[in-house]
Amino acid sequence: MTTIARGPLLDRHLQLGATVEALDGWQVALRYPQHPDRTGNALIDLSHVPTFEINGPGTGALLTSLCGADVPLRKIQSADGRHVYRLTPSRAIVFGNVASNTGAIDVTGGWASLALIGPDAERILNKVTAVDLRERTLPVQACCQGPIFGVNTLFGRLADRFELHVCSDSAEFFWDVLMDAGAEFGLRPAGIEWISAK
């Protein structure tokens, strides 16, 4: 019998009526009964995405072998279905699959990852953090760290969304903070089916 992992937000998805199915060994919220329209604001749980940490003096060399080039500090390299966040000279986080022989440490269960998508994403975040998320400060394919209501958060700006990564223990609190902040902008939860079809 295959073990199916439970993400930190699974109970919240079930309470909200999401259709939950197994995907890559994880129970994930596939769809919601009332999903946002394509021009609206959506919050999507990506905690099932494999997550790996790279540490130490060989980080640059490992990233070069993984990505074809080293990844500059505070930048995100996106390719082959993964996003590589370079945090410091000796630390990077990879969201997506990597080969098992790279020396990267699987930390998937320790992270909760959310995608905040829509025209008001930056305004929603501005209500809950003092981190300067303007595009001139945090351009597309850049990352930074800072607090949201005391929760240390890894922010990533991609072309079509913000990705927000926190420790899994804070996931439910973090979800509620974002949903409350987004209420005036019509923020709705959505399943991964919504983001894959976008």
Image (tube, helix red, strand yellow):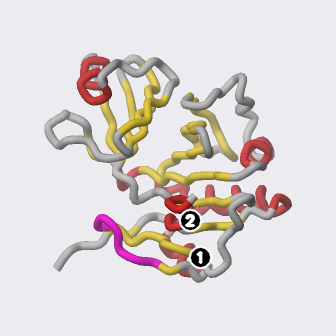
Q: Are marks 2 and 1 in contact (CB under 8 Å)?
A: yes
Picture residue at 29% right of the left edge, 46% below the top: 97
**Closer to us: 179 or 21:** 21
The magenta span reads: 20-25
Q: Is residue 55 above or below residue 173?
A: above
Question: Is residue 155 visible from the viewing direction of this image?
Answer: no
Residue linked to disc 2: 194
Q: Quadrant of the N terminus?
A: bottom left
Residue 173, percent from left and from top: 62, 60
Residue 109, percent from left and from top: 36, 55
Give the quarter of the image for residue 90: top left
Q: Quadrant of the C terminus?
A: bottom right
Amino acid marked by disc 2: Trp
State how far apart marks 2 and 1 are (Cα): 9 Å
**Closer to us: 190 or 90:** 190
- Dot placed on the residue nearer the N-terminal end, 2 or 1: 1
Residue 16, percent from left and from top: 62, 79
Picture residue at 56% right of the left edge, 45% below the top: 163
Q: Is residue 60 magenta?
A: no
- Please state which of the two labelled residues, at mark 2 or mark 1, is closer to the viewer: 2
Amino acid marked by disc 1: Tyr
Extreme residue toward the right, this view: 184
Say whether residue 52 is left or right of residue 153: left
Say whether residue 109 is left or right of residue 126: left
Residue linked to disc 1: 32
Quick one: SS at disc 2? helix
Numbered-mark total: 2
